[in-house]
Amino acid sequence: MTLLPHINERFAGTIWRMEIDSLSDTLFVEIRDNEEKKVCFGSVDLNSGKVYFKDVVTPERWLTGIEAAYNGVLLIHYYQSETGPTHKGLLAIDAYTGEALWSNFTYGFDHLSVNGPIVYDTRMQPRKLFLADIKTGTTSRIYEPYIYGEPENSISVPEQLTTELLPAGLITIHPYGNWVHYLEYNNFRIVSLHALKAGQLIQMLYVFAKTDRDEYREVYEDLLNTDIQKIQPEAFILHKNRLIYIKNKAELKVLSL
């Protein structure tokens, strides 16, 4: 058995952030181009691999970013100023067409509940929270924590382990710093690590599958980054049975396990 990505998509810029809508199994990406001072957004179906769009730009080309995703809608925030991190205003985009559904420049986003986004009016003090309709932006009743619980995201992240804690014989390459990021899923073992090659720091990803003899065989390998100046964070996540990672900062890859 050899695995191949069912999503392998390059974007025109750095993938700055990803967000997954678990209800529709849609993955959204925020792509930033620092030289052009431009932000665009993409949407991909994690099941079929279909790219719904990859270059949607809002009227505000730079001071904007992903806030949340829910039930086939991407929520985008604006920044109050170029010099601060404060968010102000929301724009909702259809996950499948990239078309704007609604916008409100006085809303602030608080968090995502199992029933949808919880927002507040930035002009009002003290802050009062309301449930917003993700499709229209209209608000209904005041937020009550015991009614609107937290949604499940179905995301698993790897843990950091030293090589001594890995299954015996799993990797042959010596990792830089003697530690790796590691995740188990069914009969698969997923490892990302840093290593030195010709004096340069690189980052690798490996997937191993358990055989009938209770041994592990490599079924996938990818070079994620080369000539790294500093240790990178964890290289992948698992959403349900989808292994998701970014290569060379601009390539989105997804494998079905």
Image: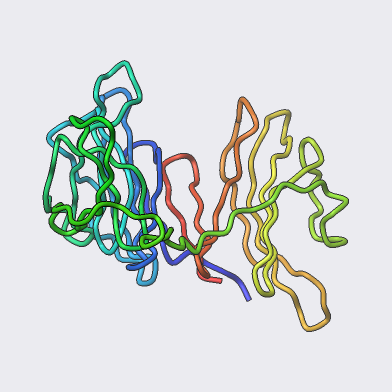
On screen, residue 166 versus residue 124, left or right, reads right
User: Percent x, y for residue 116?
Assistant: 29, 58
State the residue at coordinates (25%, 38%): 108
Residue 93 x %, y %: 19, 52
Q: Quadrant of the N terminus?
A: bottom right
Looking at the picture, does residue 143 appear above or below residue 58?
A: below
The quadrant the C terminus occupies is: bottom right
Q: How many callouts does the rendering have?
A: 0
In-front residue for pair 251/79: 79
In the rendered structure, the answer to whether residue 79 lies left or right of residue 98 reads right
130 above or below 217? above
| Residue 173 versus residue 23 in the image, above or below | above
Q: Quadrant of residue 63?
A: top left
Say how the picture is coloured: rainbow
Query: What is the residue that sits farthest to the top in this orientation?
Result: 83
Q: Quadrant of residue 83?
A: top left
Tell me if 247 is positioned left or right of 57 in this view: right
Q: Residue furthest bottom?
A: 212
The percent position of residue 246, horizontal first and vertical second, equals 48, 47
Q: Position of residue 121 (x, y in %)?
A: 20, 37
Q: Residue at x 36, y 66 (%)?
A: 49
Q: Give the residue at x 82% y 57%.
A: 166
